[in-house]
Amino acid sequence: MTVTKRNVVVIGATGSQGGSVVTEFLKHPHLYHIRAITRDPSKSKAQKLAAQGVELFRADLGGDRENLAAAFAGADVIYALTDFWQHQSAAAEIQQGKAIADTAAEITTLRHFIWSALPDPVALSGGQFLNVHHWKGKSLVTEYIQTQKPDLWAKTTTILFPNYFENTLTYPHQYLPVKDDKGIYNVSFPHSPQTVMPNVAIRDTGKLVHLVLEAGAHYFTKTIAFWSEAISEADKLAELGSYYKVPTRYQPSSASEFQQLLKSRDGMSEDIALDFTEQLLIFEKCGNVYAREEFVQAKDIPGLKLQNWSEFIRQHKLL
């Protein structure tokens, strides 16, 4: 039987999430034709995709709607995301997200829209945390699709992303321990040693998206919490120390101390340091909000094997 290829448009194809989706889809050339949306097709990552048969398309997500419509033309599937950290502005991210949704809603060939999102921090915390703008912006786009684009929502799957194990590779100064003059590896977060956060290997994104697409309409209008393991930063540190056979110390900090660290060590502004800190405090005060019954739990999806922390640290040189 002849299988008709699906035309899949992937936003952020040269990044961690979109790159994982493209990598997985390239394993199934009989199922997918891939179009990668990129701001700069001349970059080496984009050219590597082109060499593997991926169609490149230059588009500005928040700019010319006609250009975005051309990028989406003929799509059966759109994998959509926005990047708060590009502008560090919820307003800019919401503008991008709405532009993507508005344009996708007009694509008559579209069969499945997959939206990379984050949960509503205000709702999940009962109004305790009002400054997690990089969550709130995405959640407002989700709400916009659901309430203002009902036909698009009817074929949308929302995926909530947690902390990535790969943050230890991309931002080692923030996520890996620092050795002091006594040879002890130290980590500090505004969490008790028992506070767990959902974590996942971002490279597993493509595996999830492939299974979601193969399930047809099963995950339409559903929100999937994408995490493999709920683990505390203290336990992650302890396992890292055990694997490398080095002494470790987990040091809980106050919220104000952690914000100051983010500003002095990482050069974050006052607003972004507060945003980042409150994100962590949600898990301290409200538990693992990703484990709520209203979400489909990715780790329970049949056929999906997700990497855990123990496996991750054995595949990468972290210390």
Image (cartoon, rainbow, N blue to C red):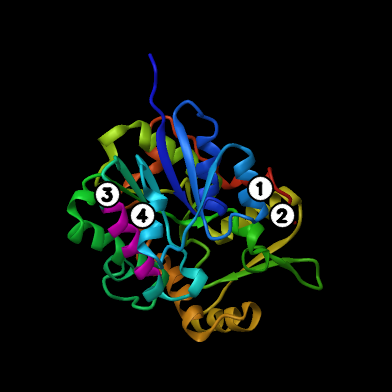
- In this figure, which residue is indicated by the disc labeled 2? 318
Type of amino acid at the residue the image marks with label 3: Glu
Q: Earlier in the sequence, mark 2 or mark 1?
A: 1
Callout 2–callout 3 Cβ contact below 8 Å:
no
Crowding at mark 4 (Cα within 10 Å: few <14, some 14-19, many 20+): some
Callout 2–callout 1 Cβ contact below 8 Å:
yes
Q: Earlier in the sequence, mark 2 or mark 3?
A: 3
Between marks 2 and 3, how big is the CA–CA gap? 34 Å
Crowding at mark 3 (Cα within 10 Å: few <14, some 14-19, many 20+): few
- In this figure, which residue is indicated by the disc labeled 4? 69
- The x and y percentages for residue 283 are 41, 65
* Boundaries of the magenta span: 93-105
- Camera-near label (2 vs 4) is 4
- In this figure, which residue is indicated by the disc labeled 1? 313
Q: Earlier in the sequence, mark 2 or mark 4?
A: 4
Callout 3–callout 4 Cβ contact below 8 Å:
no
Instruction: Residue 101: say if magenta.
Output: yes
Q: Which label is found at residue 293? A: 3
